[in-house]
Image: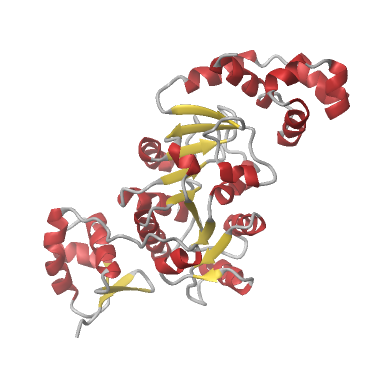
Amino acid sequence: MGVAESLADWLRLTLIPGIGGETQRKLLTAFGLPETIFSAGRQALTSIVGDKAARLLLDTDNHPAVEQALVWSDAPGQHLVCLADPDYPQTLLQIPDPPTLLYVRGRLDLLNSAALAMIGSRNPTPQGSQNAERFAAALAQAGLTVTSGLALGIDAAAHRGALTASGNTVAFIGTGIDRIYPATNRQLAIEIAARGSIISEFPLGTPPVAANFPRRNRLIAGLSLGALVVEATVDSGSLITARLASEQGREVFAIPGSIHSPQSRGCHKLIKQGAKLVETVQDVLDELHWKSAPAEFPLQSESAQDIPGLLHSMGFDPCSLDELAHLNGLTAGVVSVMLLHLELDGQVASLPGGRYQRISQA
């Protein structure tokens, strides 16, 4: 059987309404491959999944949806990856409910790369966003793939940080792969698809249904060696992802914050429950026994030339990124890169409230 015919059978199985992942796994365990399932008789199917599911399997005509997905996968950089595919993420095979089929836009090699999940609030503080972006940049520089959910806030900052560092990032989404949600992250999604990977287990056209986002969270955790929670309230969905990571045997990390900030209380709760308290990127790398130390953040030559002027403009009093950008006639993005370089070099410290301070070298 050719690849297209085999994929058609995998699609046919996963696109039958009422035949969920648990039933699909029962059938695959009993019969092997989808083509064997569909060639089995009604009696054999009924003995495994019952009469109602057997009727759905044999009587549902989802040919148009199957063809639509096959056409989608013919486009460059768009892939269908089934459980039997060697490109299927091996870490997801370790979770209780691995998806039968994944829709992937972008690089297939990242599905089996060493990854760390970065998650948190959709409404972070400025300091939380900066922490997410800077930690993601340094972790990506250390060779880890940063995984997250393409949501507003911490998720988006983590993806941006990895991309800024020319590192790898993977986004798991809770809609069909042909939908971008939220729409404000459209440009970010385009960049991730071009340089990283976007993954969905949901059929094409699936809208942003609330119940699908907790489901995708298990994949963010499952693909990764651990999960780093940057900022979260006590009722945040990020804590669900952290719990799933713990249940899957992954490490859980949390960055502490102000005792007065609601956005820090979820992280504090996780730390009380045994999550590893994280102050530096090296804390994460040490816990994971990751051998590669974070490399210095790459700077464009023109940015490197501006560093002495940036340090001079800082003096030794706390100042904000926007103030530094205005004083030096640079964009906030360029200054952020320079500050990360200086922080990794031990010349600048980040402070609460999104401020920075030069450290005396005396």
Q: Position of residue 41 (x, y in %)?
A: 83, 15
Q: In this figure, what is the number of numbered marks? A: 0
For the question of whether residue 158 can be seen, the reply is yes
Residue at the (42%, 35%) spot, across then down: 107
Q: Position of residue 223 (x, y in %)?
A: 55, 47
The correct choice, above or below, for 91 with respect to 254 in the image is: above
Residue at the (70%, 46%) spot, across then down: 96
Residue 55 in which image quadrant: top right
Residue 330 in which image quadrant: bottom left
The correct choice, above or below, for 89 with respect to 336 in the image is: above
The correct choice, above or below, for 174 with respect to 331 in the image is: above
Q: Is residue 60 left or right of residue 308?
A: right
The residue nearer to you, when weighing 68 against 282, is 282
The residue nearer to you, when weighing 156 against 59, is 59
Taking the view exactly as shown, the residue that stands out farthest to the front is: 291
Taking the view exactly as shown, the residue that stands out farthest to the bottom is: 362
Q: Position of residue 119 (x, y in %)?
A: 51, 56
For the question of whether residue 182 can be seen, the reply is no
Which of the colour schemes (rainbow, by chain, secondary structure, one colour) is used?
secondary structure
Q: Is residue 93 left or right of residue 130?
A: right
Residue at the (56%, 30%) spot, across then down: 85
Which quadrant does the C terminus fall into? bottom left
Q: Position of residue 182 (x, y in %)?
A: 48, 42
Which quadrant does the N terminus fall into? top right
Q: Is residue 182 left or right of residue 354?
A: right
Residue at the (21%, 80%) spot, across then down: 316
